[in-house]
Amino acid sequence: MTVTLMDFQADWCGPCKTQEPILEELEDDWPEVDFERIDVEEKQDIANEYQVRSLPTLIIENDDGVVERFIGVTQGDDIETALEEASA
């Protein structure tokens, strides 16, 4: 099963910078997950498609579709739990 974590962020977003090291650590721990960083300034069409209204927004999806959506800075444990569910 393909699992993707989409990190919707922007260069000017302070909370996004707080979220970044958490995601970098998870990316090392979860090599089978495709981590995509999406700058909403450059990719507004994708942000609109997923109805992203606040930053940071994390969306985890698998072959069945969106599994989880986090808005705001999210702790690594919560993200990891969602990745486990999406991978099952």
Image (cartoon, rainbow, N blue to C red):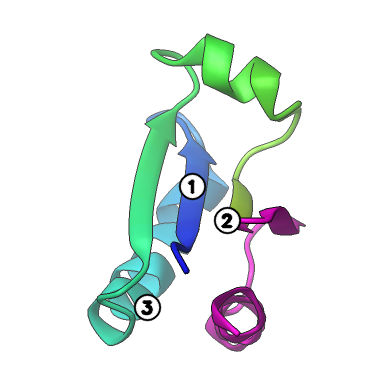
Tell me residue 7's x, y (percent). Answer: 48, 47
**Cα distance in 3D space between marks 1 and 3:** 12 Å
What amino acid type should be assigned to the residue bearing mark 1? Asp
Q: Say which mark, if any, is on residue 26.
A: 3
Other-residue count near label 1 (Cα within 10 Å), few / some / many at <14 / 14–19 / ≥20? many
What residue range appears in magenta? 61-88
Q: Are marks 2 and 3 in contact (CB under 8 Å)?
A: no
Mark 2 or 3: the one toward you: 2
Say which element carries label 2.
Answer: loop
Q: Earlier in the sequence, mark 1 or mark 3?
A: 1
For disc 3, the neighbor class at 10 Å (few under 14, some 14 to 19, many from 20) is some
Relative to 56, 4 lies left or right: left
Residue drawn at x 60%, y 45% is 56
* Quadrant containing the C terminus in the rendered view: bottom right
The residue that disc 1 covers is 7
The label nearer to you, 2 versus 1, is: 2
Q: Which mark is residue 63?
A: 2
- In this rendered view, identify the residue nearer to me: 7 or 84: 84
- Say which element carries label 1: strand
- The three-letter amino acid code for the residue at tag 3 is Leu
Report, in whole angstroms, how far the alpha carbon at label 2 lies from the one at label 3. Answer: 20 Å
Q: Is residue 71 visible?
A: no
